[in-house]
Image (cartoon, coloured by chain):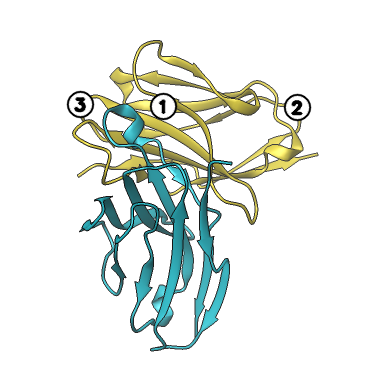
Chain colours: A yellow, B cyan
Amino acid sequence: AQSVTQPDIHITVSEGASLELRCNYSYGATPYLFWYVQSPGQGLQLLLKYFSGDTLVQGIKGFEAEFKRSQSSFNLRKPSVHWSDAAEYFCAVGYSGGGADGLTFGKGTHLIIQP
Amino acid sequence: EAQVTQNPRYLITVTGKKLTVTCSQNMNHEYMSWYRQDPGLGLRQIYYSMNVEVTDKGDVPEGYKVSRKEKRNFPLILESPSPNQTSLYFCASSFSGGALSYEQYFGPGTRLTVT
């Protein structure tokens, strides 16, 4: 079965510091990879996605992620975090064969920003 | 504006009292899904639908029903809610076919409390 692991339940980062959130997925052919963000009391917003091609993808709000097939990883990065980045971040994966059954989500990483 | 809407946004009910959470999308998407979000568990899919009158179980379907009589609507029905169904529920939709079918557009969420 598909699975997504986000090893860090909580991460605390100082404002202005760099950020990396980890995501690993179970082996599968041609994964489609996503990062979503959920701000407090809000719904889910798509940050970025990887379908194919260039393994470094740019998203909204200054985020980027790199797909590494050899490590089954899709880590999210930001060079300098802002207090408004405090939120819950979810990595998600879908496998080719049809998207009707949606995505498999990780359990999320809660990002805390220290002033 | 392209969107997925859910109603109600907040609901407190008692055990055993049937309820329906509505979901509607205006993007002419074929695929629709329901997820529940619980702390430490991420998002888990309840049911999905590939088109009108075509639905299937997701990962956690017990205690839920769905119907898809119109393309734009995908209501979630709890015929006899129990306290373990207290959760945050998200409806999502996507295009059919190819990689884009995996990109989920989420509604704002419905917070359900069953006492």
Q: Position of residue B103 (x, y in %)?
A: 40, 35
Whole-angstrom CA distance, mark 3 to mark 1, is 15 Å
- Report the side of B14 relative to A83 (left or right): left
In this view, the residue farthest toward the front is B70
Whole-angstrom CA distance, mark 2 to mark 1, is 23 Å
Q: Residues within 10 Å of mark 2 (few under 14, many from 20)?
A: some
Give the residue drawn at x 57%, y 66%: B9
What residue type is disc 1 on?
Phe
B104 and A2: which one is in front? Answer: B104
Quarter of the image for residue B18 reads bottom left
Q: Residues within 10 Å of mark 3 (few under 14, many from 20)?
A: few
Q: Are the residues flagged by discs 2 and 1 in contact, CB closer than 8 Å?
A: no
In this view, the residue farthest toward the top is A54
Residue A29 disc label: 3
What residue type is disc 2 on?
Gly
Which of the two discs, 3 and 1, labels the residue nearer the N terminus? 3
- Dot 1: element: strand
Residue A74 disc label: 1
